[in-house]
Image: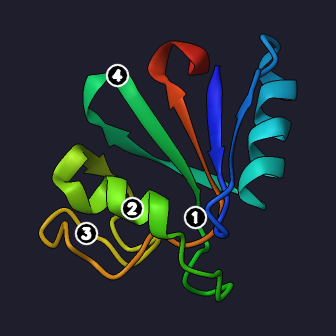
Amino acid sequence: MATVIQVDGTERQVVLSKKTHEKMEQIQKYVGGYYTPITLKGGKIMLVNEEGIPRGLLKNPKASAIASAGEFTQMFPDSINEHTLSNKTGSSILGDVLIVDRKELE
């Protein structure tokens, strides 16, 4: 089961489709557009809107706390939000995010 974390702090559990195309559409709906992964420890992946900065998305304090805690191991591209691998204490993750187990994306 995946977790949606909205910018207002609301969290909810969602079930992603097993069908690849439907799953992609669901993820885009939850993050508000095209998305990119941030690899977290423990087999988790945070999917974020890849246009967070140019679209002026709001800061997501809960998602930012997860990333700022040093939990992410890989982010590509590293400028999609306001974090980078060299600066894990960047300002914020922007927009609604979806946290999934790596297995859910296979």
CA distance separating discs 4 and 1: 21 Å
Judging depth in this view, the residue of 60 and 106 nearest the camera is: 60
Of marks 1 and 3, which one's residue comes earlier in the chain?
A: 1
Q: Which numbered marker is on residue 77?
A: 2
Does the CB distance between marks 3 and 4 fall below 8 Å?
A: no
Residue 40 x, y percent position in the rendering: 31, 38
Color theme of the render: rainbow
In what quadrant of the picture does the C terminus appear? Answer: top right
Q: Is residue 77 above or below residue 58?
A: above
Front of the two marks 2 and 3: 3
Residue 25 x, y percent position in the rendering: 85, 39
Local SS, label 2: loop
Left or right of residue 106: residue 25 = right
CA distance separating discs 3 and 4: 20 Å
Of marks 2 and 3, which one's residue comes earlier in the chain?
A: 2
CA distance separating discs 2 and 3: 9 Å
Q: Which numbered marker is on residue 43?
A: 4
**Callout 1, which amino acid?**
Glu
Q: Mark 3 points at which residue?
A: 84
Of marks 4 and 2, which one's residue comes earlier in the chain?
A: 4
**Callout 3, which amino acid?**
Thr
Local SS, label 1: loop
Q: Which residue is drawn at 71% across and 55% down?
A: 31
Of marks 3 and 4, which one's residue comes earlier in the chain?
A: 4
Local SS, label 4: helix
Q: Mark 1 points at which residue?
A: 50
Residue 82 x, y percent position in the rendering: 38, 78
CA distance separating discs 4 and 2: 19 Å
Of marks 4 and 1, which one's residue comes earlier in the chain?
A: 4
